[in-house]
Image (cartoon, rainbow, N blue to C red):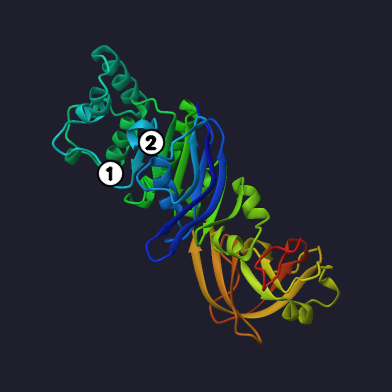
Amino acid sequence: MATIDLIDVRKTYPGGVEAVQGISLAVGAGELVVLVGPSGCGKSTLLRMVAGLETITAGTVSIGGTVVNKLEPAQRDIAMVFQNYALYPHMSVRQNLEYGLKNRGTPRPLIDQRVAEAARILEIAPFLDRKPRQLSGGQRQRVAMGRAIVRQPKAFLFDEPLSNLDAKLRGQMRVEIRRLQRTLRTTSLYVTHDQLEAMTLADRLVVMNAGRIEQVGKPTELYERPASLFVAGFIGSPPMNFFELGYLREKAGSSLPALPEGSDIIGVRPDSIVLSAPQEPSIPLPAIVELIEPVGGESHLHLRLDGTGQLIVVEVAGRPDTAEGATQTVYLKAVALHPFNRETGRRTA
């Protein structure tokens, strides 16, 4: 196991476009850290700089304590898994797994041992003599991971490896990747734009925005205490609702708790809004039900607030006792308010 350390890493393209703006991050030995953010936020560029596929404008990248800025990708002792699998179509699964080891002059008995072990771990032994075109998407991704495993690298780098799979396969492969990483305990840096994928896989989550890190922490920490309006709106599905403080003051009466100075935007998670008055202090908001979305064992209600016309989303268990077009008062739990400052975009408490 090895650490990955980034110190003030920057990437500037010709014309002065800054894709990565001074990122510092330490990935512990055996840790799985996920970089998540919208398209264009710099997460894939950062991963490619760690891999050596993108030059570094400034800062340092270290793997296992060795600065690798000037090392070629093959010299960094990392293995990368791509979204398009990057398998050789004319080779069998076995040959794909062996290829990197043969190029490094690995003895045949050791090649056979590592290929057999990877095939056992990933349950692809029955497919070793097939070509990639004869495999499903999930099987191809297992082979791609197998090719990384046989290398026994210092670190794994994953570049949106599940984005080409359907929803069911993505769910299955998330479990596979997490199980695999816990078994091998190989330090891993994983990039995705899918926040559900990020939340379920990560030991720690790094939310990026416009080339910078917005927040780093355990997934539950980022969900329960987002540090900025961006993180609050990005993490969570459905996303957090935001209210003007003045509007809530008007509706709350004595139910609005004391809020830190500088608070003017209040965030509330959809599951912290209920359809009937709770016993604890709450803020009633009259609204019109515009749409009801049944989602498995729960429902998402899209409501338009009376007076402001703002749309909000409420998450309830089962099927709600209301209908589209109905007038519905909803209640914000006063203990579940997230205060932010509009100008800075940061949390105020």
In the rendered image, the quadrant that contains the C terminus is bottom right
- Helix, strand or loop status at disc 1: helix
Residue 336 versus residue 16: which sits nearer the camera? 16
| Residue at horizontal 57 percent and vertical 40 percent from the top | 26
1 w.r.t. 206: above or below: above
Q: Could you say where residue 68 lies in the image, as x and y percent from the top left?
A: 44, 36
**Label 1–label 2 contact, CB within 8 A:** no
SS under mark 2:
loop
User: Could you tell me the amino acid type at mark 1?
Assistant: Gly
Image location (x, y in percent) of residue 142: 32, 35
Graded by Cα atoms within 10 Å as few (under 14), some (14 to 19) or many (20 or more), the crowding at tag 2 reads few
Res. 19 visible in picture: yes
Residue named by callout 1: 137
Q: Quadrant of residue 338?
A: bottom right
**Residue at the image point whose x is 26% and y is 17% from the top:** 112
Give the residue type at disc 2. Answer: Leu
Most distant residue in the right direction: 254
Q: Which quadrant of the figure has residue 285? A: bottom right
Q: Is residue 326 left or right of residue 175?
A: right
Q: Earlier in the sequence, mark 1 or mark 2?
A: 2
Residue 12: quadrant of the picture? bottom left
Which residue is at a point 16% across and 39% down the rendered structure image? 89
Residue under pointer 2: 71
